[in-house]
Amino acid sequence: MIPIFDSLTHPTCDGAWLGRKGVGSFFDLHKSMEKNLYVGACVVGLPGVGEYEHSKFARECKKYPKMVPIAGLSLNVSSLEKELISIKDLGFRGIKIHPRYGNFDLEKDKESIIEILNLCNKLDLIVMFCTYVA
């Protein structure tokens, strides 16, 4: 058997995916991973999608040991440092910078992105970066 690890899954807190109800729950992903013998998956939250909220998403992830939690990050926070420390404390292994869902403008927010990268390095958080901007 060849071990398979899915590097990008998007289960949601409410089980909906972009307006479609009942297609994206953590349990559904778990069942699919078990059925197909996956060894693990990064489960990536997206701000504003499926009632995403850090603590609720992390709590769901902890129910399934093969899921590696990745927090969806938004620039709509008062302090990036406090936000990232909270993410780390909740048990997330990394963050996702997603320009469309996280309210990032790659040109205007360069300084914030550099700050995020430096903070994540200090906190030992993996950074996933969506480069699809359309």
Image (tube, grey):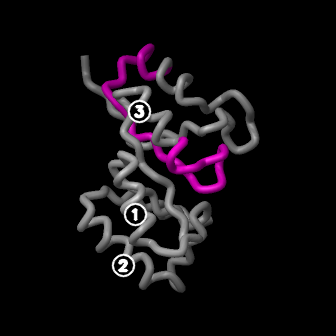
Residue drawn at 36 percent across, 62 percent down: 85
Indicate whether 132 appears above or below 117. Answer: above
Callouts 1 and 2 close, C-beta under 8 Å: no
Disc 3 marks a residue whose amino acid type is Lys
Residue 62, label in figure: 3
Which residue, given by chain and number where applicable, does mark 2 sit on?
114
Q: Earlier in the sequence, mark 1 or mark 2?
A: 1
Which residue, given by chain and number where applicable, does mark 1 sit on?
84
Callouts 3 and 1 close, C-beta under 8 Å: no
Q: Quadrant of the N terminus?
A: top left
Residue drawn at 47 percent across, 23 percent down: 30
Q: Residues within 10 Å of mark 2 (few under 14, many from 20)?
A: few
Residue drawn at 41 percent across, 55 percent down: 87
Q: Earlier in the sequence, mark 3 or mark 2?
A: 3
Q: Secondary structure at mark 1?
A: helix
Residue drawn at 27 percent across, 62 percent down: 123
